[in-house]
Image: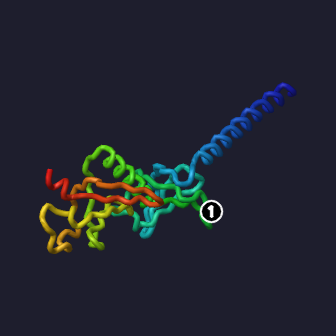
Amino acid sequence: MAEKDVVMNESQDAKENIQTQLQEEYLKSLDSLEEGQIREGVVIQVTSDQVFVDIGYKSEGRIPNSEFSILPKIGDKVNVVLVSKEGRHGEVIVSKQKADSKAAVKVIRQAFNDKTPIEGVIEKVVKGGFSVNFGGDTTAFLPISQSDTSKVDNPEKLIGVKSKFYIDRLYSDNKLNVVVSRRKYLEE
């Protein structure tokens, strides 16, 4: 009987050791998540107002449907930024829009360095030119003189135009400031 007790104790010790290792691995994976980091998540539920995404953390992230131009389906992969590991109700706070913006900034910097055109949409008329959207909430300034190859008499007709733009100038104080030229692209 004593031999059987020893074997059971060893078996129980092994189970506890494995459980301890699994808990440590789980806690390490939680520590590897950093706020501001882009993570790939899997859509696990879509409701009338929110999309739930599993990013491998202790709870799912919720994203308002307004952050999607086309709602994803269950099982789709979505890039999100981890805004906060724990909100006021203990939930993970993530943002698809911020992930889109980070990706757009990366594309803009690459296009500036490589001197290649990138695609954007002329959104609205602003003082002295236009605001161009490159995805997410990333916008650039397009001077009216750089918006077309000829003089622009009716600026409103360019609203909604999807085109390619060269990055003329890139400033980065606290927020990315970008100046683009559509004229340069059209002249090519």
> What residue lies at 14% left-to-right and 73% top-to-bottom?
153
Quadrant of the rendered image containing residue 133? bottom left
Q: Name the secondary structure under disc 1.
A: loop
Tell me if I can see residue 113 in this picture: yes
Quadrant of the rendered image containing residue 74? bottom left
Front residue (pair 142, 83): 142
Tell me if I can see residue 75 in this picture: no
* Vertical placement of residue 74 versus 64, above or below: above
Count of numbered circles on the image: 1
In what quadrant of the picture does the N terminus appear? top right
- Residue 63 position, x and y percent, is 47, 63
Three-letter residue code for mark 1: Gly
Q: In this view, does 19 lie to the left or right of 64?
A: right
Q: Is residue 187 left or right of residue 31?
A: left
Give the residue furthest to the left: 150
Quadrant of the rendered image containing residue 47? bottom left
Residue named by callout 1:
90
Front residue (pair 182, 121): 182
* Vertical placement of residue 66 versus 80, above or below: below
> What residue lies at 83% left-to-right and 28% top-to-bottom?
6
Q: In this view, does 79 lie to the left or right of 141?
A: right
- Residue 55 position, x and y percent, is 51, 51
> What residue lies at 62% left-to-right and 47% top-to-bottom?
31
- Residue 123 position, x and y percent, is 28, 68
